[in-house]
Structure formats: structure tokens, C-alpha cells
Image: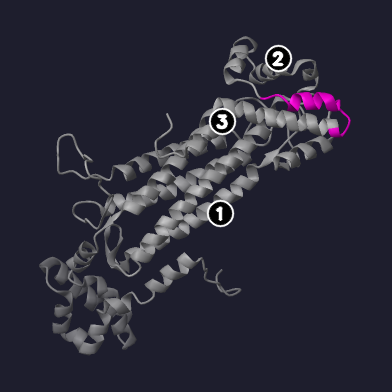
Amino acid sequence: MIPRYTHPEMGGIWEEQRKYDTWLRVEVAATEAMAATGVVPEDAARDIASCAGVRAERVDEIERTTRHDVIAFTTAVAEQVGPSARWLHFGLTSSDVLDTALALQMRQACGLILDDLGQLLEAVGDRARQHRDTAMIGRTHGVHAEPMTFGLKLALWHAELRRAVGRIEGAREVVSVGKISGAVGTYAHLEPEIEQRVCAALGLTPAPVASQVIQRDRHAELLSALAITGASLEKFAVEVRGLQKTEIGEVEEGFAKGQKGSSAMPHKRNPIGCEQLTGLARLLRGNAMAALENVALWHERDISHSSVERVIIPDSFITLDHMLRRFTTIVRALVVHPERMQENLDRSRGIVFSGTVLLELAQRGVSREQAYQWVQRVAMRSHDERLDFKALLAEDADVMGVLLPADLDRAFDLQRQLRHVGPIVDRVLSGDTVSVPAGGNS
């Protein structure tokens, strides 16, 4: 069953009927190319092109006898075309049709994934602008680190999603390749010009070299790109789940009127959407691994990849389509609690400014080691005794023997700490990048 968040067209690309319709497109393009070069009669090409299609049910019925899907397909077409069908599939091997048609399906599916990514980028960008200056605590190792903004976190997602767009676009180019080169890729029965004409008609690039099949490193690259995109969504989803913990309570998935969180506990509002996305990302990674296993085939071809691809390619596209569309819905409905973010920022009683105090002391001639010792001593007391860090510093003879009260105030100035964050968010959302001078980063 297609998940309810999935674009209906994505499921349609991978239906059996669409598959046979796409095979027929390749067969028609091939006979038309052969007619144009005098290989088959023009009237035969017209007869084949006039075929309105074959019913998937009829192909399946024939296949129960032939045990060969392409022969079942060509037989079903021949039933409609008549005598001209002797020119159908002329000089072709099954994989000429299968792989070229699969390229068309994958290219179309990539287009839908890119549309999904565009929608998610827009949603994340909108929320990043909204929370550009919403202060929160940053966490490393799950522990309070230094202040940041929620907009910065979302900008990080936005930049990662743009990289996903680049990967999918690149992978789409890699798999948009066709072949009409025969049983072992030698063009023994048809001239290379036929392949060029077919690919041009279908909007594909001819494979520069092939065996019986288009090489599966291309498909592995695509499924890896899909899996990496899923891994990014998992990363974002895990962050939402973490921030929705009761003890943190800074962000939560939208909870609709009438929605229920638990059959036993009426108070529950769980991050179920993000949890589901986390699980589905594992599926994509497993499929990518299977695609990598498909790269190695015996000699010019075996069919160990074929049965796997019938599952992993449609499923990966349908799964990621669902994930992207669902996470877009989650982002748009995300409930953000700035007051809780500020509350959590204040919970550590100011010790998150310890690094700034350290630098203030170092700037005034105190060795880093000595400054670290002084600041850590006060910070540990603040933590253990639950006392205000700044107040303790103001009472410390070592620290205040070097710093003025104004220096201490500056070290605890949140706006000064965050002064570069807004421009970072703006830079990311505008699509600008930071240039590195030649030789400046080795």
C-alpha cells in the first residue's frame, strides 16, 4: 500500500501497467529509428507505433506460460499489431528495453523527489527566517555548550537539503542513460546510430559502453543519494525528538484536534512522525547496500540484480517521497516554544559563557592554562552548588584582579555572543557561499 503522504504520481510510475507502457515507448522508438535508417519497413514501424498499449493482465497471463516477461510483453503487443510485429524487438535484447525503460522511470521519479525537496526547503527556510534570532542553548554531547539560535539550527538543515538536491540532480544525470547495443554490447545486429536515435527520441544519453546491461554502479549511486537524503531527514527528525523530550520541551510536532497519543495515557503527545521517519531511513540504507551488491555481475550479465531492483528501486523512491512530504508537513506545523528555550538557556546559571570569560582573561595577559583553571574552578562551584556563575566570578579575587566589571558584563552579553548568527542564517537562505582564498585551506 502506498503511504498516504506519498504523491500519487510516484506510485503510478512503478505500477505494472506503467512499466509495460514504458517498454512500449522504447520499442516504438527503436522501430521508428530503424525505419528512418531503412532497417525495417516504414509501414511496419507505423503499425507498431499505432499500438495503443497492452493490458498488464494479458502480459501476466502469457508470462505464466513463457516464464519470460519480455517475451510475454512482445507476444501481447503482437496480438494487437498483426503481421508487422515480426519487426518488433528486431535486433534487440531484453535488457535494451528493460534498462532503457528503467532509466525513463528513474528520471521521472527523481523529478518528483526534487519537487518534494523544493517544498521542504521552502518550509525549512520559512521557519529559519521566523526563528532567525530565537535564542536557545546549543548542546554538544547532549550537554549545554554555548548559546545559538533555533534559526541557525534550521539553516543547517536548509544547507544540507540543498546538498541533497545536488546529489539527486547528479544521480538523475548518471542514470538517464539508455542502451540499444545488443546481447553483449557489441552492436552486432544494429548500428550504433540506432541507439543514438532512440536515446535522442527519449531524452536519454547513450551509454558510451555497455555489456548486456547498463552498469549498476549508476543505480547504486542513485540509491545511495536517496539513502543519504533519508539519513539527513533522520538527523532532523532525531533532533525534533530530542527537543520534544519533556525535560527539554523546546519544540514539538503539531498535535491536531482529536489526535490521540497513547491508548493508556491520555496526556501523551508523542513525536510519532519523526520516529517513523527515523525507522524508514534505515530501510533506505538497506536498499542502498543491496544496490551496491548489485554492481558485481558475472561476466557480461547475470540476473542476480534483477529481482532485487524490482523491490529496492520502486520502494526507495516511494519511501523517500513519503518521508519528504511528511517531514514538510511536520516542519510547517512544528510548535516552537521560545520561552522554554530561554528558560533552558538560563538553567545553567550562566556557565555557558565560561569560554568568553576565558578569552577575556587571556586577552589581558593571563596564560590560557591559568585562566582555564580559574574559570573552571568557579564554573564547577556554580554547577555543584547551583549558584549564579557571574555572581561568583564577581566575587573571585583572581578573576576580578584582572577584569573590570564592564569586562565581565561584556563576557555575558548574549547579543554580542550571537552577533554573527543572523548573518549566517541570511547567507544560507540567500544561497551565498563563503569563498576560500587560494591556498587558504589545505
Amino acid identity at mark 2: Glu
Residue 351: give x, y in percent of width and height: 22, 71
Q: Amino acid at mark 3?
A: Glu
Residue 96 colored in magenta in the image: no
Amino acid identity at mark 1:
Gly
Q: Which tag, 3 or 1, sits closer to the chain's start?
A: 1
Q: Is residue 342 above or below residue 56?
A: below
Q: Which residue is mark 3?
A: 309
Give the left or right position of residue 24, taking residue 227 as reference.
Answer: right
In this view, 317 is above or below 419? above
* CB-based contact (under 8 Å), mark 1 and mark 2: no
Pointer 2: what residue? 79
Tell me the magenta residue range: 36-52
The residue under the point 56% across, 44% down is 110
Q: Residue at x 38, y 72 (%)?
A: 422
The nearer-to-camera label among 2 and 3 is 2
Which part of the image, by quadrant, shows the C terminus?
bottom right
Circle number at residue 166 = 1
Residue 44: which quarter of the image? top right
Mark 2 secondary-structure assignment: helix
**Gap in angstroms between the C-alphas marked 2 and 3:** 29 Å
Residue at the image point whose x is 31% and y is 88% from the top: 364
Task: Identify the mark nearer the N-term, 2 or 3.
Answer: 2
Tell me which numbered mark, 1 or 2, is placed earlier along the sequence.
2
Q: Gap in Å between the C-alphas at discs 3 and 1?
A: 24 Å
